[in-house]
Each structure stands twice: as C-alpha cells, then as structure tokens.
Image (tube, rainbow, N blue to C red):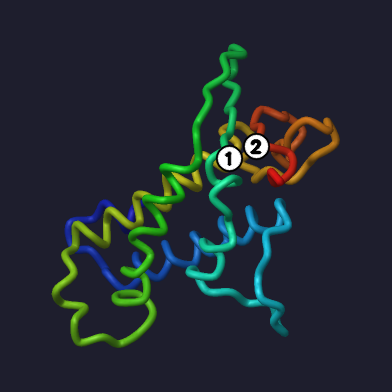
Amino acid sequence: RTAVSTPHLDRQKVASAAGVLLEQLLDTLTWRYACSLPRKNPPSYTLGELSSAISGKLLSTLRVEQIDSDGTIHEIPLKPLIEACTQGSWIRNQVGAHFNIDEATISDNDVRQFAQNTLALADALQCDHCRQLPANNKTGEHWSCGGTCKKLRLHPLQKPA
C-alpha cells in the first residue's frame, strides 16, 4: 500500500507485487471452486489461465459478505473487482515481470490503478477482523474466513453447474 501511494513510484516493484498477489487470490478462488485448469507439474499457472478458469456463471455469482463489529452485513459482488484486476493484468507482464521496450508508454497512473484494483480485491476477500481468506466450508452454506471470528462469508459454496 505504501509503495502504491509514494510520489516516486517503483513501477516494477509495484506491478510485480500486485501481479503476485492477484495470482494468489485467483489461485485461491480457482482452488475453492475446483475450476478447470490445464494439468501441470508443478502446478504453476499464469494470470491468464487463472482468470480464464473462473467461468461466467461462477463469476456472476461470486460475492462476499463482510460482517462488521455491530453485526451489519456488507455485501460485495466480486465480478467487478475481478474484471478490473484482470483487465489490467497485462501491466504486470509489461512493467513488472519482463523487459519490454514499450514499458515506458505505460503511465504511472495505470500501474497504480492495477495495484489499487488488486488491493481492492484482496480487501474484499480478506476478513476485516481476523485478516484470513475464506477457507472454511463447515456451515454447508458458504465459505467463511479461516479464523475463528467467521465474519467473512464467500458465496456460493459450490461452483454453479
């Protein structure tokens, strides 16, 4: 967060870190929902493979509920957040992962926006209280955060048919 807001942006560092975080978040979602991915050994996937694996039906139904300390439920649809991240994921390759002569044509604002979009998705998927990602499905109704507070719910429980 600090690296994104500094006046002198370390473009490569920010784009690379945002790309790695986005890979982790998409990997978590594709794992939770058993999304189809090509078999690899080791199983390391590109941003394109991970984002393509989240089908339209699943993408349309993905949402989280964050429950604040007074019990108010805040619902956050994930589709716009995921789409904002994946539409900018090319920035990671152009600026943060590979040498590219055209990298200079990508503005600092574009790099910042990619990172901010990725952070927004991370904030939505991470419990505000215990800071855990959804990892528990014991309710049979939704995924909840991996901590003990259970104040984050990820819907749906299973990938739509």
Report the side of 77 relative to 12 (left or right).
right
Q: Nearer the viewer, residue 11 or 84?
A: 84
Q: Closer to the N terminus: mark 2 or mark 1? A: 1
Instruction: Tell me residue 132's x, y (percent).
Output: 65, 43
Q: Amino acid at mark 2?
A: Leu
State whether residue 20 is above or below residue 63: below
Q: Quadrant of residue 151?
A: top right
Structural crowding at the residue carrying mark 1, measured as other residues with C-alpha within 10 Å and reported as few (<14), some (14–19) or many (≥20): some
Spatial separation of the CA atoms under disc 2 and disc 1: 7 Å
Instruction: Tell me residue 52's x, y (percent).
Output: 53, 63
Going 54% across and 70% down the picture, which residue do you hit? Answer: 49
Going 35% across and 56% down the picture, which residue do you hit? Answer: 115
Per the image, label 1 sits on a secondary structure element best described as loop
Mark 2 or 1: the one toward you: 1
State whether residue 45 is above or below residue 141: below
Per the image, label 2 sits on a secondary structure element best described as strand
Q: Amino acid at mark 1?
A: Leu
Instruction: Tell me residue 34's x, y (percent).
Output: 73, 57
Going 56% across and 33% down the picture, which residue do you hit? Answer: 128
Q: In the rendering, which numbered label is found on residue 62?
A: 1
Marks 2 and 1 close (CB-CB < 8 Å): yes
Q: In the rendering, which numbered label is found on residue 117?
A: none
The residue tagged 2 is: 154
Instruction: Tell me residue 63's x, y (percent).
Output: 57, 35
Structural crowding at the residue carrying mark 2, measured as other residues with C-alpha within 10 Å and reported as few (<14), some (14–19) or many (≥20): many
